[in-house]
Image (cartoon, rainbow, N blue to C red):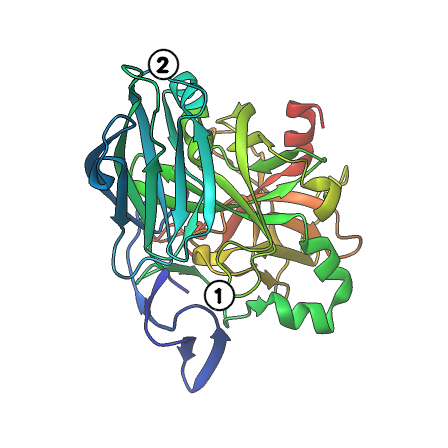
Amino acid sequence: MSLKTAICKEDVLVMRTGCVAAVLTVMLGCEVVAQTVEEGRAPLIDGQLQDVKRELSSLDRTPDGRIAVMQGRATARTIKLRLEHILGSNAPSGVAVVVRDAANNEVVRYTAGKLAEERYVWTPEIKGRSALVEVTESTTAGAEFRVLIAAIASHVPPSKPTLNIVRDFDLENIEYIRANQPEIFVASRPVAKISFVSSKGPAACTGFMVSDDRMLTNYHCIGSDAICKSADVIFGFNKSDSPLGDEMQKCLRLVDKDEDLDAALIEVAGSPGKRWGSLALSDAIPILKEPAVVVQHPAGFPKFVSRIDCVVSTMPAEGVKVGEESDFGHSCDTMDGSSGSPVLRRADLKVMGLHHWGFVDHGGKWSAENRAVQIHFVKKRFGL
């Protein structure tokens, strides 16, 4: 089967193969059509970046000079703002930048000193398409603090997400898994959506906890500290009407990376592994035809699981580095945004692979097979 994309509409994802219609309830609905994609190893670009250049000052006595309502794209499910310190590193301690959502709930508060130290920040994800930014008024004469609202990243559900589907469409909603495969549901808890801003715009991938505060994902997702600084890690995003999930934490730093293995180890704030658990990494070498499970956030949607017709299909396989057989092929259904997902052994639900490569539509073997990095290479490289 060649690489496909989904044209999304209404509230059902539909794939038609002959007279078969597989229906997947997600945020949007999609009718599958063919698409040529040159590179199957890239994060999902799920929105647009707007330059806004709005300045606010703590010394301005008018609301318009200290308060701004920022609007993202009309179809945005969430937005985040880039705030840049431009003046006032010695502002009084009472001066702060406060960001609220459309319901006037405080999302985040940055002291003037903290923002001056950071120089710029990406706010956490904000539900909806609008946010209010206020610089609290300074009561000290001459101690001005000035901030620039430089950009808005609008996360918009993709209109044409790529489907890397082998045979029938077999992705299953996590709520179905909760009810029917409780052991897989428990194993899915450490898996989270990663929402960040890439050089091409707002983007999304998947990652999974391997300790209380460390997460594995792909290098092509989080490949630098600058991208990490923009990233939110969203746990418990199981329903489309709750895009911020049950817990959201910031990516603190890129701990280690390996471009050849397409792997990145990041530190996540708040030690979420204490609440959501972590996945064990298998020492076993993947076996051809071995049953597998992939837990993922396909197309940036809520959590889904691939387990039907999901097996190791090629072992070993060439990875990113030419001549190095660091990968294996698998037949588990994925989409853009599934990058960084764990491929679990069905026998014990330990991680045997780090999914990173969808179909490449140039004919030949890899036009109908996904690829994952053998986790024992990642485990050894990062000392996990």
Report the front residue among 324 and 218: 218
Q: Is residue 287 above or below residue 306?
A: above
Residue type at tag 2: Ser
Q: Which one is earlier in the sequence, the residue at label 1 or at label 2?
A: 2
Please give left or right for residue 253 compared with residue 359 in the image: right
Q: Residue furthest bottom?
A: 19
Residue 139 sits above or below residue 333 on the image: above
* Residue occupying image coordinates x 44% and y 46%: 125
- Residue at 42 percent across and 40 percent down: it is 196
Image quadrant assignment for residue 140: top left
Q: Which mark is residue 240?
A: 1
Question: What is the residue that sits farthest to the right in this orientation?
Answer: 348
**Viewer-side residue, 181 vs 168:** 181
On residue 89, the disc is: 2
Question: Which residue appears at 77% of the width and 37% of the height?
Answer: 283
**Place of residue 169 in the rendered image (x, y in percent of width and height, measured from the top left):** 50, 71
Q: In the displayed structure, would residue 5 be above or below residue 365?
A: below
Image location (x, y in percent) of residue 235 = 60, 50
For the question of whether residue 63 can be seen, the reply is yes
Q: Residue at x 54, y 65 (%)?
A: 239
Mark 1 and mark 2: Cα distance apart in space: 41 Å
Q: Where's residue 223, x and y in %?
A: 45, 29
Three-letter code for the amino acid on which mark 1 is drawn: Ser
Please identify the quarter of the rendering in which residue 65 is found: top left
How many numbered marks, from 0 up?
A: 2
- Which callout, 1 or 2, points to the residue nearer the camera? 2
Q: Secondary structure at mark 2?
A: loop
